[in-house]
Image (cartoon, rainbow, N blue to C red):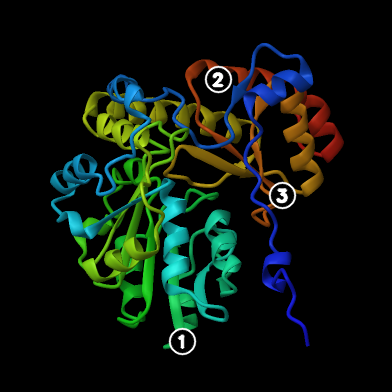
Amino acid sequence: MQKKLVPDYIERLETYQAGKPIDELAREKNLTRISKIASNENPLGPSPMAIREMTNVLWDVHRYPDMSAYQLKKALSELYRLKPENIVLGNGSEGIMGYICRAFLQEGDEVVTASNTFIGFLILAKSVGAKLIEVPRKPDYKYDIEAMAKKITPDTKIVYLANPDNPTGTYITKLEFDTLMKHVSPHTIVILDEAYFEFAKEWPDYPDSMDYRYDNVVTLRTFSKAYGLSGVRVGYGFGHDVLINALHKVKLPFEPSLVAQKGAFGALSDRPHLDRTLHNNRERFQDLWDFLTRHDFKPIASVCNFITFKTGSEAASLALFNGLLDKGVIIRALRANLMPDHVRVSLGTRDEMNHFFEVMEEILPAYNAKFGRPTK
């Protein structure tokens, strides 16, 4: 029998869908005021120090970047008290996820994770033919740690934990993480995806992975969220030198780019900008939470820079998404995450959130009447 050119598990994959770009919406709707609160980006933008570092290096982009990323790794080593050989860099944290799948997963290998978690990892795992075991969540959208533990066997190759989780914003506590790790074999790799670490670390029961030293745990973090560098793509990972060395064998050379390395170094140097980001996040979070509860939506208790809430049906989600889009507000519908009756709203600037509130007040009367919701 002749082999197929494209494997079945690749044909079954759905392409990742990013949030609608601002320029595209402006062209489509002929709008001038647009608020993109869909992709969990930093609404304050990058640090001025990051911009300075990137600008200063632009005349050198005809040169390949430092393949060892000495300057950035040194800064990360000092910040987190690690050796450089325990650090891997990539094209965003998703780039490192791809390296993990390439280095450690083969067709048919088992991966245990939660249902409706970060779709980027699910796509990467499926792209190598891995067998995904997705454990349903609790009614409060948190991971069901006991149920996950029961699914872990000696055949489990990877356990993927987005902590905090995207798209729900919930997190695994220290007690839950300790409990789960008792069921994990030393030969099973645990991915702790901490893309939203900077927002979650303020919670006392959040298990900062740097407080642990498991040889089989790989921590992933990114400069795309709190540091405001989504556009240059740079992420980093921590792990035992044996695992990190394996990842370096399969990663693309000269990644991250020269500009990305310099931007990340500058961002790490600007603590005041990070503090402003976290302050804005706390204020905008409370504003959005109050608005949603006042209008009888049911937001999920998030510790991130976004809030996901239930609409009741896929039709209601699409109506809300499109109604906002027509007025220049971009949010995220969650059909691709198999949560079609939910939408996610990122926390923007004060002006962006006021734009969202204004448009919501305008469209909600007709929306509520159509879907049988109470009218304020």
Name the residue beneath numbered marker 1: 155
Picture residue at 64% right of the left edge, 18% below the top: 34
Name the residue beneath numbered marker 3: 341
Relative to residue 307, is residue 328 drawn left or right?
Answer: right
Q: Is residue 350 visible?
A: yes
Instruction: State how far apart marks 1 and 2 are (Cα).
Output: 48 Å
- Quarter of the figure with residue 64: top left
Mark 1: few, some, or many residues within 10 Å (few <14, many ≥20)? few
Q: Amino acid at mark 3?
A: Asp
Vertical side of 66 occupied by 326: above or below: above
Q: Secondary structure at mark 2?
A: helix
Instruction: State how far apart marks 3 and 2 are (Cα).
Output: 24 Å
Query: Residue 11: horizontal and vertical position, in percent?
Result: 73, 65
Q: Quadrant of the N terminus?
A: bottom right
Q: Secondary structure at mark 1?
A: loop
Mark 3: few, some, or many residues within 10 Å (few <14, many ≥20)? some
Comes first in the chain, label 1 or label 2: 1
Q: Residue furthest front?
A: 62
Is label 3 or label 2 in front?
A: 2
Query: Residue 267: horizontal and vertical position, in percent?
Result: 29, 31
- The residue lying toward the viewer, choosing from 143 and 286, is 143
Name the residue beneath numbered marker 2: 352
Q: Amino acid at mark 2?
A: Glu
Q: Residue furthest top?
A: 32
- Quarter of the figure with residue 332: top right
- The residue lying toward the viewer, choosing from 361 and 245, is 245
